[in-house]
């Protein structure tokens, strides 16, 4: 299956929205005159990463990979290096 952009864009938008909420909440709950911008950015970054990281991982793993014919390949065989090219498409592979 090809990569589906909405499978990533929706969770990333949610991650950004939640991170902004945490940022604004941190600022709003601070003592007047106290600079909490570093703490607010840090908390927002952690929130974003907690949602975005699994979404990115799932998006990448959703791809089906096929190697087309004619791709250069090389390996080490029992008699030494071996080089060649693929002759047919590979079977579809899924990243686990």
Image (cartoon, rainbow, N blue to C red):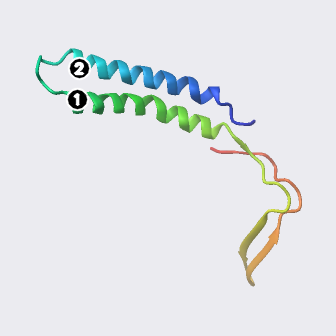
Name the one closer to the observer, 46 or 94: 46
Left or right relative to 62: residue 72: right
Q: Residue at x 45, y 28 (%)?
A: 51
Identify the residue under disc 2: 27
To which quarter of the image does residue 68 belong? Answer: bottom right
Q: Quadrant of residue 78?
A: bottom right
N-term-proximal mark, 1 vs 2: 2
Of all residues, the one furthest to the front in this rendering is 33
Residue 60 got which mark?
A: none
Q: Eyeballing the image, is 45 above or below 71?
A: above
Contact between marks 1 and 2 (CB within 8 A): the answer is: yes
Q: Residues within 10 Å of mark 2 (few under 14, many from 20)?
A: some
Quarter in which the C terminus is drawn:
top right
For the residues marked 1 and 2, what is the alpha-carbon distance in whole angstroms? 7 Å
Give x and y (percent) for residue 88: 88, 57
As drawn, 82 above or below 62: below
Q: Position of residue 5 (x, y in %)?
A: 65, 30
Q: Is residue 21 left or right of residue 1?
A: left
Q: How many marks?
A: 2
The residue drawn where x is 74% and y is 37% is: 2
SS of the residue under disc 1 = helix
**Farthest bottom residue?**
79
Q: Nearer the viewer, residue 11 or 57?
A: 11
Residue 52 or residue 81, whichever sits in front: 52
Residue annotated with mark 1: 37
Residue at horizontal 82 percent and vertical 53 percent from the top: 90
Establish if 54 lies above or below 34: below
């Amino acid at each position: 299956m090809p990569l589906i952009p909405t499978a990533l864009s929706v969770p990333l938008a949610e991650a950004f929205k939640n991170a902004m909420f945490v940022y604004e909440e941190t600022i709003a709950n601070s003592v007047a005159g106290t600079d909490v911008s570093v703490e607010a950015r840090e908390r927002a970054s952690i929130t974003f990463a907690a949602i975005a990281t699994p979404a990115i991982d799932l998006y990448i793993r959703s791809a089906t990979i096929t190697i087309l014919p004619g791709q250069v390949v090389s390996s080490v065989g029992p008699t030494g290096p071996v080089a060649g090219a693929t002759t047919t498409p590979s079977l579809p592979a899924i990243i686990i």
